[in-house]
């Protein structure tokens, strides 16, 4: 199994973000475009908490909290979930180039970037932030309006390019192809909360060359599986942010994994074997499924890990990324009946393993990890 795992795994691979993590660099719009409301949702066969959150315009963290879910990786068909009454914030128009923003309690760089129609990489670069993208309450940030990742990640552009909507297009796909954000496209074209577009419509693409896509750092397909454009777009922005910020060496990351595992009561050999299988200890690794860093954790799993450890985790930060992965691994070890099942749950998702058993690629993954444990033991 290579770094960029092919299956969009329930627990370690998916695609939504919250202010608790610095994982998504684009603004996600609810498919319905409606505000949150007090309602119930009955879980259907094949549902995951991530897919439910997407369809209902909320987040994994909020669903887990509202329904007191001990293990957000597991929901069962027929289970009734309460949906939050909190309405999601609508998209915000991009800030003017060089605008200032004062950090408030609960802010993250990804949340700030999304609200202002820019990217994590652009905010990191404009403010000289380190690899952790650490910010503090009261800090004044320069917000590069509509900026994209550094020149190495995207070509120079001119504002206001035109794009004619094609069959099958979505705003997120168009934004990803042109190196901009959903929020920026929505604002530039006066779209409503549904971000509805029609074939033949001409859109103004802010900060993009006419029809020219941004340079791709992360492809959309791996091992025959193609991922959604908005997921791949977020993955590319996260990859650019990691490359721009700089990361520790592989040896340093391996040491972090071993030390964190010991501190959190997880077998260091197991944690190192998983990290090596996932990324080879390369923290700039980002998969088409937007699995981030050394432990290849996706944003929704980062939300769960934040709950497990009792504090927000920034998946771009090397230390937090390792904590997130080890926390998830520890949870599976504690709840699975045996070690192979725990390893499989990290890869495939606990609910999927329970429902379907191990897929063929999962069995290979488990065998590889167990073999690697002897190397790190």
Image (cartoon, rainbow, N blue to C red):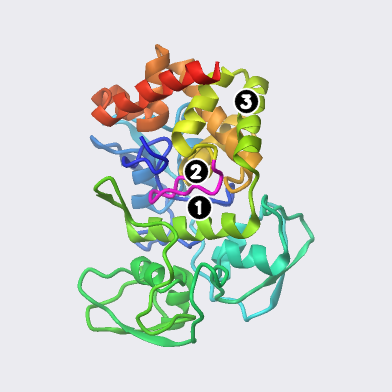
Q: Are marks 3 and 1 in contact (CB under 8 Å)?
A: no
Report the front residue among 150 and 147: 150
Q: In the displayed structure, does residue 176 sit left or right of residue 271? A: left
Question: Which is closer to the viewer, label 2 or label 1?
Answer: 2
Q: Which residue is mark 1?
A: 86
In the rendered image, the vertical position of residue 358 relative to residue 146, given as above or below = above
Q: Which residue is mark 2?
A: 62
In the rendered image, the vertical position of residue 206 relative to residue 51, given as above or below = below
Q: Residue at x 59, y 47 (%)?
A: 20
Q: Would you call the spot at circle 2 few (<14 residues within 10 Å), some (14-19), or many (20 or more)?
A: some
Q: Main secondary structure of the magenta part?
A: loop
What percent of the width, then of the height, locates residue 324?
A: 57, 35
What percent of the width, then of the height, locates residue 365?
A: 35, 28
Does the magenta-highlighted stretch encompass residue 101?
no
Q: Which mark is residue 258?
A: 3
Does the magenta-highlighted stretch encompass residue 286?
yes
In the rendered image, the vertical position of residue 78 relative to residue 5, given as above or below = above
Q: In the displayed structure, does residue 159 sit left or right of residue 110? A: left
Sequence order check: which comes first, mark 2 or mark 3?
2
- Part of the protein shown in magenta: 282-291
Q: CA distance from mark 2 to mark 1?
A: 9 Å
Sequence order check: which comes first, mark 2 or mark 1?
2
In this orientation, does residue 149 appear?
yes
Q: In the displayed structure, does residue 101 sit left or right of residue 372? A: right
Q: Secondary structure at mark 2?
A: helix
């Amino acid at each position: 199994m290579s770094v960029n795992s092919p299956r969009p795994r329930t627990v370690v691979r998916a695609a939504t973000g919250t202010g608790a993590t610095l994982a998504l660099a684009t603004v996600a719009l609810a498919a319905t475009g409606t505000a949150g409301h007090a309602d119930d949702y009955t879980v259907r066969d094949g549902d995951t908490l991530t897919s439910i959150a997407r369809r209902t315009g909320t987040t994994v963290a909020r669903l887990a909290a509202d329904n007191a879910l001990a293990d957000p990786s597991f929901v069962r068909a027929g289970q009734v979930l309460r949906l939050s009454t909190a309405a999601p914030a609508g998209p915000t128009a991009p800030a003017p180039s060089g605008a200032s923003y004062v950090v408030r309690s609960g802010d993250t760089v990804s949340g700030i970037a999304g609200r202002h129609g820019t990217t994590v990489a652009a905010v990191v670069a404009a403010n000289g932030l380190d690899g952790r993208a650490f910010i503090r309450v009261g800090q004044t940030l320069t917000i590069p309006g509509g900026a994209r990742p550094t020149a190495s990640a995207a070509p120079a552009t001119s504002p206001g390019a035109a794009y004619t909507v094609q069959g099958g297009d979505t705003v997120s796909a168009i934004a990803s192809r042109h190196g901009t954000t959903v929020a920026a496209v929505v604002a530039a074209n006066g779209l409503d909360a549904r971000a509805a577009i029609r074939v033949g419509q001409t859109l103004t693409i802010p900060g993009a060359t006419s029809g020219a896509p941004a340079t791709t750092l992360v492809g959309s397909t791996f091992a025959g599986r193609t991922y959604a454009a908005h997921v791949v777009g977020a993955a590319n922005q996260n990859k650019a942010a990691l490359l721009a910020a700089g990361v520790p060496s592989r040896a340093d990351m391996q040491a972090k994994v071993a030390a964190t595992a010991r501190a959190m009561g997880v077998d260091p050999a197991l944690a190192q074997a998983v990290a090596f299988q996932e990324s080879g200890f390369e923290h700039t690794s980002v998969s088409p499924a937007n699995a981030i860093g050394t432990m290849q954790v996706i944003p929704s799993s980062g939300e769960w890990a934040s709950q497990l450890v009792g504090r927000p985790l920034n998946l771009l930060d090397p230390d937090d990324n390792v904590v997130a992965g080890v926390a998830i691994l520890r949870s599976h070890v504690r709840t699975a009946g045996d070690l192979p099942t725990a390893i499989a749950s990290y890869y495939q998702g606990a609910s999927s393993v329970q429902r379907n058993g191990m897929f063929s690629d999962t069995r290979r993954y488990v065998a590889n990890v167990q073999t690697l444990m002897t190397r790190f033991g």
